[in-house]
Image (cartoon, rainbow, N blue to C red):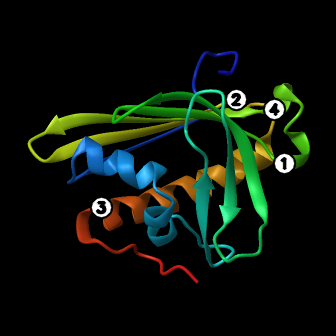
Amino acid sequence: MTNPDNKPSYVYVTYIATTPEKAWQALVDTEAMRAWWVDPAAGCARINVSDWKPGSRWEHTRADGSGIVDIVGKVLENAPPRRLAFTWARPPEEADASKHSTVAFDIEPYSDGLVRLTVTHDGLQDDPKMLEGISGGWPKVLSNLKTYLETGRALAAAH
């Protein structure tokens, strides 16, 4: 799912003082997510719920107990602690694969005590509204992840 120029729709790279194992755990552990995956616009934490097996469904839900599911998809790859990839769609568009984009988290050891986390979100060329939303959202969420892994707390408090 890349655009006609064969360029990813969105790529974010950050360097985190942590281990690949700790970075991986923060991506798949629901309780850890409550601390760092905060939606600044909504002011509440989000969690990703899945068993993370390839082919399994995952849900991006609000952690406030409301039961509201904002994004859904299928797990494409699960290669701990190096790569996690899944499809990404609005719930009403779940059955229409042409409306899905793809998110991949690549975790690589970089240097002593550092990892490079690359998040690639592809397949958004036909969805400018989603591209606009994730372009503002990913930097905030991933800054929270970095701070959480390096200090034990996120920048924005979950409500």
Q: At 77% from the left edge and 33% from the top edge, which residue is drawn?
A: 100
| Residue type at numbered disc 4 | Asp
Q: Nearer the viewer, mark 4 or mark 2?
A: 2
Identified by mark 2, the residue type is Gly
| Relative to 78, residue 37 above or below | below
How far apart are labels 3 and 4 at the CA level? 34 Å
**Badge 2: how crowded within 10 Å, few (<14), some, or many (20+)?**
many
Element marked by disc 2: loop
Q: Distance of mark 2 from mark 1, alpha carbons? A: 17 Å
| Quadrant assignment for the N terminus | top right
Q: Earlier in the sequence, mark 2 or mark 1?
A: 1
The label shown at residue 123 is 2
Asked if disc 3 and disc 2 are in contact, CB closer than 8 Å, the reply is no
For marks 4 and 1 on the same chain, the one whose residue lies earlier in the sequence: 1
Q: Quadrant of residue 97?
A: top right
Pick out the residue farthest to the left. 112
Q: Which residue is drawn at the image coordinates 37% and 45% (left, top)?
A: 24
Q: Mark 4 points at which residue?
A: 126
Q: Earlier in the sequence, mark 3 or mark 4?
A: 4
Quick one: SS at disc 4? Answer: loop
Name the disc covering residue 149, or none.
3
- Judged left or right of residue 101, residue 93 is right
In which image quadrant can residue 133 be found? bottom right
What amino acid type should be assigned to the residue bearing mark 3?
Leu
Q: Residues within 10 Å of mark 1 (few under 14, many from 20)?
A: some
Name the residue: 41% across, 75% down.
155
- Left or right of 36? Residue 54 is right
Query: With 53 as the anchor, is 92 left or right in this view?
Result: right
In this figure, which residue is indicated by the disc labeled 1? 91
